[in-house]
């Protein structure tokens, strides 16, 4: 796994890999949980101001209460070395259709 973490962000117990998604509030990395060797998707906030952190925590807590085959399972959460919140969830590789089916 090619590592794309920079010197400012590291998360104890994880090896960050490539960015597999990005949105307005966070990047999602393909990562390896070192204790289990399991591949996870690790969501790391862009910033960790109070409002963003509160929304992220609320989202994490709500997701943790849901159980459905199409909702990823939360494995872990915490803060990076610089205090940025993260959540590690089940990694699922999806292949999206390349053309529209009408």
Image (tube, rainbow, N blue to C red):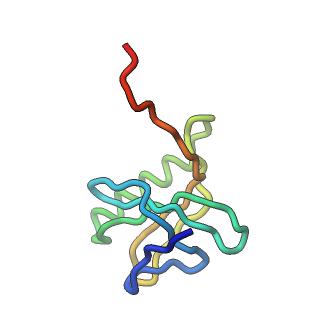
Residue drawn at (46%, 77%), measured in percent from left and top?
80
**Residue that protrudes farthest toward the bottom in the picture:** 7
Quadrant housing residue 22: bottom left
Quadrant housing residue 21: bottom left
Question: Residue 2 appears at what percent x and percent y?
Answer: 51, 71
Residue 15 to residue 51: above or below: below
Quarter of the image with the N terminus in it: bottom right
Residue 15 to residue 74: above or below: below
Left or right of 1: which side holds 46?
left
Residue drawn at (58%, 74%), measured in percent from left and top?
14
Residue drawn at (37%, 61%), measured in percent from left and top?
27
Quadrant housing residue 99: top left
Residue drawn at (40%, 32%), measured in percent from left and top?
98
**Residue that protrudes farthest toward the right in the picture:** 36
How many numbered discs sit on the rendered protein? 0
Left or right of 80: which side holds 24?
left
**Residue that protrudes farthest toward the top in the picture:** 102
Question: Residue 31 appears at what percent x and percent y?
Answer: 55, 65
Question: Residue 60 appears at what percent x and percent y?
Answer: 48, 54
Question: Residue 90 appears at what percent x and percent y?
Answer: 60, 52
Quarter of the image with the C terminus in it: top left
Q: Nearer the viewer, residue 83 or 40?
A: 40
């Amino acid at each position: 796994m090619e590592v794309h973490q920079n010197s400012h962000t590291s998360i104890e117990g994880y090896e960050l890999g490539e960015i597999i998604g990005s949105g307005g509030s966070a990047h999602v990395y393909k990562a390896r949980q070192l204790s289990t060797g399991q591949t996870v998707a690790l969501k790391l906030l862009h910033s960790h101001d109070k409002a963003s952190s509160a929304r992220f925590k609320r989202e994490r807590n709500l997701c943790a209460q849901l159980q459905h085959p199409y909702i990823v399972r939360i494995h872990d959460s915490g803060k990076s070395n610089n205090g940025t919140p993260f959540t590690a969830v089940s990694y699922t590789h999806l292949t999206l259709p390349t053309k529209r089916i009408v």
